[in-house]
Image (spheres, rainbow, N blue to C red):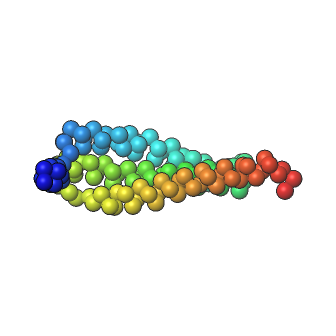
Amino acid sequence: MALASASSMCSNTGTSKALSYFTASFPVFLIILPIPGNFLVCLTIIKDPFRNLKAPFNYFLFLSLASTDLVVGMIMDPVSVAFHISEGLQLNIVDIKILHILYFILCTASILILMAHTVDRYVAVSSPVK
């Protein structure tokens, strides 16, 4: 009986304001740094004046990875900041399910691109004639 009452008392507690604002500060840096960097990588490959970067390998690796990370920085990180600030203000504007879905889809896409690049490089090294 004591265990049931202790768990019901803890279910109504929220996070502290200091912790919410502290965790909201990290994605702010992740918004400021990767968005311009990944945008410049995409722009460099697309607008290459000498056509040195217009290879399928560069499209496969750099453009797809930079565009995925750009979307993570433009969508995932602002939603994360909004969630942590609304959690600190106790507004409950952003649902945690939305945050988890965005994180799962966008970060998994970025990781799968890296995995596909690893498989591509392995095949290129293990059988260079093909």
Q: Is residue 51 visible?
A: no
Quadrant in which residue 116 is drawn: bottom right
Residue 124 % position (x, y): 77, 50
Name the residue rendered at 21%, 38% in the picture. Answer: 18
Describe residue 16's horizontal placement relative to residue 117 as left or right: left
The furthest residue to the front: 1
Name the residue rendered at 40%, 45% in the picture. Answer: 31
Q: Is residue 56 visible?
A: yes
Is residue 103 shown above or below 125?
A: below
Residue 129 % position (x, y): 87, 53
Name the residue rendered at 51%, 43% in the picture. Answer: 37
Describe residue 38's horizontal placement relative to residue 116 as left or right: left
Residue 121 % position (x, y): 72, 49
Q: Quadrant of the C terminus?
A: bottom right
Residue 68 % position (x, y): 52, 55
Q: Nearer the viewer, residue 115 or 2?
A: 2
Q: Quadrant of the N terminus?
A: bottom left
Describe residue 31's horizontal placement relative to residue 58 as left or right: left
